[in-house]
Amino acid sequence: MTKQFEIILPPFERGFHLITKIIVKHLPELPDAGLLNIFIKHTSAALTLNENADPSVRDDFETTLNDLVPENEPYYTHVIEGTDDMPAHIKSAIIGSFVNIPITSGKLNLGIWQGIYLCEFRNHASGRNLVITICS
């Protein structure tokens, strides 16, 4: 059986934000075993699973990606939406638009230090739409 629904995240500032609790809050009763897919319907933000304990990890993600994909490069031609837009698209392509998480015994089977991140790459983003699919 498959269930699917959408949630809208509130606007987040640029950076890496743990959204595990928000996702879990919106989930119905989960099957004993299955798979949860979370897909972001945007091209300037991303989703990832990573370290959920030390907040400095979030700063290091931001710093590293800004070094890899800087703003204001003269070779960018897609510039009409601002200096953060094209770098946001590139960062989104690098990180990815979905995560899959196993469901075991009716719960998300995340590692002890894993959390679900919204990677917000725009300076002034609006809320982000997520498609949640539960397969059993």
Image (cartoon, rainbow, N blue to C red):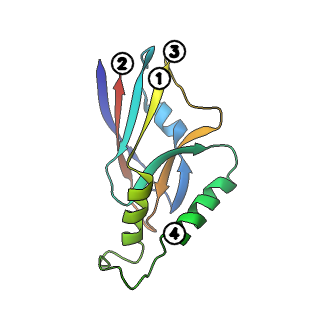
* Front position in the image: 125 or 104: 104
Q: Residues within 10 Å of mark 4 (few under 14, many from 20)?
A: few
Query: In the picture, which quadrant includes the C terminus?
Result: top left
Looking at the rendered structure, the kind of residue marked 4 is Leu
- Contact, mark 1 vs mark 2 (Cβ under 8 Å): yes
- Contact, mark 3 vs mark 4 (Cβ under 8 Å): no
Earlier in the chain: of badge 1 and badge 2, it is 1
Looking at the rendered structure, the kind of residue marked 1 is Ile
Looking at the rendered structure, the kind of residue marked 3 is Ser
Disc on res. 75: none
- Check disc 2 and report the residue beneath it: 136
Earlier in the chain: of badge 3 and badge 2, it is 3
Provide the secondary structure element on which disc 2 rests.
loop
* Distance in Å between CA atoms under marks 3 and 2: 12 Å
Looking at the rendered structure, the kind of residue marked 2 is Ser
Task: In the rendered view, tell whether residue 88 sits above or below residue 16.
Answer: below
What percent of the width, then of the height, locates residue 87? 41, 70
- Check disc 3 and report the residue beneath it: 105
> Residue 126: in sight, yes or no?
no
Provide the secondary structure element on which disc 3 rests.
loop
* Front position in the image: 32 or 9: 32
* Distance in Å between CA atoms under marks 3 and 4: 40 Å
> Residue 49: in sight, yes or no?
yes
Disc on res. 103: 1
- Residue 102 placement, left or right of 93: right
Earlier in the chain: of badge 4 and badge 2, it is 4
Earlier in the chain: of badge 3 and badge 4, it is 4
* Distance in Å between CA atoms under marks 1 and 3: 7 Å
Task: Give the tally of numbered discs.
Answer: 4
What percent of the width, then of the height, locates residue 129? 34, 47
**Front disc: 4 or 1:** 4
- Contact, mark 4 vs mark 1 (Cβ under 8 Å): no
